[in-house]
Amino acid sequence: MRFIDADAVHAALDYPGLVATLRDAFVEGCMMPTRHHHALGQVGGQEATLLLMPAWSPGQEIGVKVANVFPGNAHHALPAVSATYLLFDGTTGQPRAVLDGAALTVRRTAAASALAASYLARRDVDRLLVVGTGKLAPHLARAHAAVRDYREIVVWGRRAEAAREVAEQLGEEGYPVAVADRLEDAVRGADVVSCATLSESPLVRGEWLSAGTHLDLVGGFTPRMREADDACIRRAELFVDTREGACSEAGDIVQPLESGVIDATAIRADLYELCRGSHPGREQDAAITLFKSVGAALEDLAAARMVAARVDATTVSVADG
């Protein structure tokens, strides 16, 4: 059994390749029980959560991610999410690899949003807005830029300094990037809005969305969390990564369902249906589309397989050399 660290995970998971891998995984499917949520109580004044996410394909690899979500970690200059991924041989059940779960998570999460955008964002998009400044923010920019060409990538955060840091990082990598002062102005001027926050109250207002906008909601993973208001939900054509997960865990979907703003039929399709071609995705340039992801163990398993295969191939190549 090998340990695959964060650097190796990032190196193995290029975004064009990972988006393609996730597309294939949603076409093929796998066994994926609903993830386990365990409340750990208040830590630093905020609720901490333990997540267990298993997935497997009979006769192939078995995987499970163990993740801790500590929203208060920002006060310690630490990421909110830490995780470890365990990959097992599907024939013998023997451990195959332990992967850095945090790196795996940010990569597959960003790639899932890009995969959805490949079906839902207009072909002629010009400006991407990233809302949030956490570890996921620059990855969302990179992943979205792998499926659409952007003239400008704009970053907004509650702390201007943090937004500048993300923008500087992306700028050093050659992306055309700017920092937004006002969220409303930035949303009104964006073709794609990608949100990755832990907000429990809506940040994006439906009245700000222009015709043709694609709204990508990534951050909220509990029924309490909201990144978009009810007006966004009413105006948009709704898509999700998985129906079961979104309708039970995502506040941006759960709360409008409970209040009667929408019913379950408002969800046009999930990633299974988009990737399998049973729904075409965006059908009109003027439509407002909204994709809500909460994460799926299928994505972790597909990404872990990709990492293990590429690391194994590199090891064999080095040994042969």
Image (cartoon, rainbow, N blue to C red):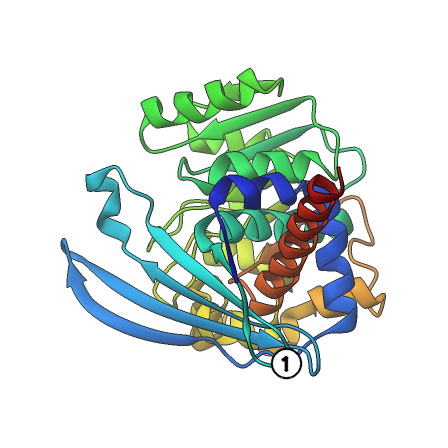
Residue at 40% in and 39% down: 134
Few, some or many residues within 10 Å of mark 1 (<14, 14–19, 20+): few
Relative to 164, say whether 285 is above or below. below
Q: Residue 193 in the image: state x and y as whole percent.
A: 57, 40
For the C terminus, the image quarter is top right
Q: Is residue 286 left or right of residue 47?
A: right
Q: Residue 312 in the image: state x and y as whole percent.
A: 67, 52
Q: Residue 161 in the image: state x and y as whole percent.
A: 33, 22
Q: Is residue 164 left or right of residue 109?
A: left
Instruction: Kindly identify the amino acid type of the residue bearing the numbered disc 1.
Output: Met
Residue at 14% in and 55% down: 45
Q: Which residue is mark 1?
A: 31
Quarter of the rendering containing residue 42: bottom left
Return the residue found at the far front. 320
Q: Residue 298 in the image: state x and y as whole percent.
A: 62, 68
Q: Does residue 25 show up?
A: yes
Residue at 33% in and 33% down: 158
Q: Circle 1 — which element?
A: loop
Residue closest to the eye, 148 or 80 = 80
Residue at 47% in and 59% down: 230
Relative to 216, say whether 27 is above or below. below
Residue closest to the eye, 205 or 120 = 120
